[in-house]
Image (cartoon, helix red, strand yellow):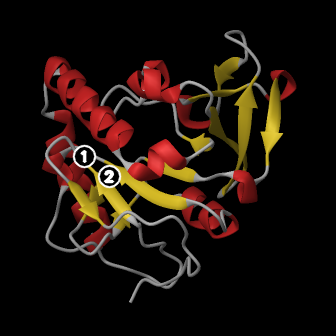
């Protein structure tokens, strides 16, 4: 078992041991911290995601008063290892996509250029103090994020998913920030010019 697989297994187990109520409360605390951040207040277009049952639920974020006037777009898998961003046009703009994840229906959504995204909120399985992020292993975000030239890139996770160090490869994208229910890691930035600075 590689280091990444081992860390992913440990972090996912830690996340899944949380009760539904604990995950709900922690998710609400995380979205409160995001809403209070300058990067969120300044953002006009935000890429978020529909959560799987054991992930941080960002649904609270779209209902907050501070979210008024913002565009919330969502990822959709378009091929092996690749995704795009779509803006749903209404409540019936959803369907089950790859891996059973709820995604926007391409026919009922508008495409969003990565360059137009101001803030990306990424799910993750594990993170560390150096803003390293470990995903599920498909590389979807790592391929998409370099296109988001004007966005602040932040991971969202439960504190229990924090590890000592996430193994990094050249293709891995370092986060600008990480939001948990306990803290905000990293520094708030309004731009990021180097999407492959993982060393």
The answer to which of 189 and 149 lies nearer the viewer is 189
Name the image quarter holding the N terminus.
bottom left
> Measured along the vertical axis of the image, is residue 111 above or below residue 27?
below
Residue 158 picture quarter: top left
Judge the density around disc 1: few (<14), some (14-19), many (≥20) Cα neighbours within 10 Å.
some
| Residue 20 rendering spot, x and y as whole percentages | 20, 19
| Residue 151 rendering spot, x and y as whole percentages | 59, 60
Residue 22 picture quarter: top left
Residue at 73% x, 17% y: name it: 93
| Residue 122 rendering spot, x and y as whole percentages | 46, 50
> Which of the numbered marks, if any, corresponds to residue 147?
none
**Tally of numbered discs:** 2
Sequence order check: which comes first, mark 2 or mark 1?
Answer: 1
At numbered mark 2, what does the secondary structure look like: helix, strand or loop? loop
At numbered mark 1, what does the secondary structure look like: helix, strand or loop? helix
Q: Are marks 2 and 1 in contact (CB under 8 Å)?
A: yes
* Left or right of 197 on screen, residue 31: left
* Left or right of 140 on screen, residue 106: right
> Measured along the vertical axis of the image, is residue 65 above or below residue 128?
above
Residue marked by disc 1: 12
Judge the density around disc 2: few (<14), some (14-19), many (≥20) Cα neighbours within 10 Å.
many
Name the image quarter holding the C terminus.
bottom left
Residue at 70% x, 66% y: name it: 147
* Left or right of 190 on screen, residue 131: left
* Left or right of 167 on screen, residue 146: right
Residue marked by disc 2: 125
Residue at 46% x, 18% y: name it: 63
Residue lying at the far bottom in this picture: please name it: 199
| Residue 165 rendering spot, x and y as whole percentages | 20, 74
Residue lying at the far right in this picture: please name it: 107
| Mark-to-mark CA distance, 2 and 1 | 6 Å
Residue 90 in sight here: yes
């Amino acid at each position: 078992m590689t280091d990444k697989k081992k860390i992913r297994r440990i972090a996912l187990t830690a996340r899944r041991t949380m009760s539904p109520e604990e995950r709900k409360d922690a998710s609400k605390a995380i979205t409160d911290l995001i809403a209070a951040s300058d990067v969120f207040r300044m953002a006009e277009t935000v890429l978020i995601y529909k959560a799987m049952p054991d992930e941080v639920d960002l649904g609270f974020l779209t209902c907050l008063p501070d979210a008024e006037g913002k565009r919330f777009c969502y990822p959709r898998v378009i091929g092996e290892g690749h995704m795009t961003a779509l803006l749903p046009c209404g409540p019936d703009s959803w369907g089950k996509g790859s891996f059973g994840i709820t995604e926007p229906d391409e026919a009922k959504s508008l495409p969003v250029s990565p360059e137009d995204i101001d803030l990306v909120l990424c799910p993750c399985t594990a993170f560390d103090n150096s803003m390293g992020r470990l995903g599920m292993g498909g590389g979807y975000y790592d391929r998409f994020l370099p296109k988001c030239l004007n966005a602040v890139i932040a991971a969202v996770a439960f504190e229990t998913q924090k590890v000592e160090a996430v193994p990094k490869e050249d293709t891995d994208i370092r986060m600008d920030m990480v939001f948990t229910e306990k803290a905000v890691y990293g520094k708030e930035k309004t731009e990021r010019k180097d999407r492959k600075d993982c060393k």
